[in-house]
Image (cartoon, rainbow, N blue to C red):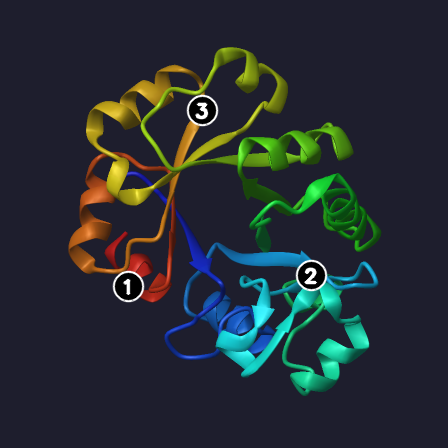
Amino acid sequence: MQTVTAVAHRGDPYRIRENTLDSLRSALHRGADAVETDVRLTRDGVPVLLHDATLKRLWKHDRPLHTLSADEVRGLTAGGVPTLAEALAATEGSRVMLDLPGDPGERAVTRIVAVARECDATDRVYYTGDAVTMLAVRAADPSAEIALTRKTLAPVRPTLLDVIRPRYLNYRFTLLDHALVEHVHRTGHLVSCWTPNTGRSLRRLLDIGVDSITTNRVDVLDALR
C-alpha cells in the first residue's frame, strides 16, 4: 500500500473544538502529516480560523465575522478563535492546508498569502478552494502549492489548469473511484479528497491510490496506512 498524506480536518474536531490551537496540536500529536483549517478575514482585515461566516454554531454568537474586529472576536470567544499567525506559530514545522471558504475576494486572499509570507511559512503552507479563489492565490504567490477543489465530475478546462497550476485535484471523496484516480495521475496531478470518516471509506480510498486524505479521524487513517 502506498504512503498517503494524512490531513487533519480542522484539527481534531471529534475531541476538541474545531479550528482552535488545541485542536490543531492534538491532530498533529495523533499522527497527522498536515492540518487543514479554514481562514476568513475580520472587519479589520485580520485572517482568523473559522469555517462559518458567523460565530453562531461554534461560539453561540449570531454575529457575522466580517462585521467584527479581531479584538471583538477575541472578546466574544475568550480567545478561542486564533489568528492565522497564531496558528502558524502553533504548528511550526508542520504542513498546513488553508481552506478559503465562500467567496473571499482578491483582497482577502492577498492578505492571507501575505500573512503566510510574514510568518516565514510559505514553504509549508498550501491552499485549497474553488477555481476563482485559487486564481487569486496564484496571482498573489506564483510559487504557491494549490489543491484545486472539485465538487463534480466535470473535467477541468486545460486552460484553467495551465493558469492555476495545482499540485492536487481535491475531490469530495464520494466522487472518487480507481478510474478517476488513474486519469488524474496521467494528467500529472496528485489526488486529494475530503472528508471520509469511516474505516470502510478510508480503506477504499487507500486501495484506489488516493495521495492525500483530509479526515476528522486522522488517528484511524494513520493506523490503517
Q: CA distance from mark 3 to mark 2?
A: 27 Å
Q: Amino acid at mark 2?
A: Leu
The picture quadrant where one finds residue 47 is bottom right
- x and y percentages locating residue 31 in the rendered image: 42, 63
Q: Is 182 or 104 nearer to us in this picture? A: 104
The residue pinned by badge 3 equals 189
Give the residue displayed 46% in from the left and 68% down from the top. 27
Residue 220, label in figure:
1
Secondary element at tag 1: helix
Give the residue displayed 58% in from the left and 15% down from the top. 162
Q: Is 114 or 61 nearer to us in this picture? A: 61
Residue 142, label in figure:
none
Q: Is 207 or 164 nearer to us in this picture? A: 164
Secondary element at tag 3: loop
- Sooner in the amino-acid sequence: mark 3 or mark 2: 2
The reply, left or right, for residue 224 in relation to residue 200 is right
Q: Amino acid at mark 3?
A: His
Give the residue displayed 49% in from the left and 75% down from the top. 57
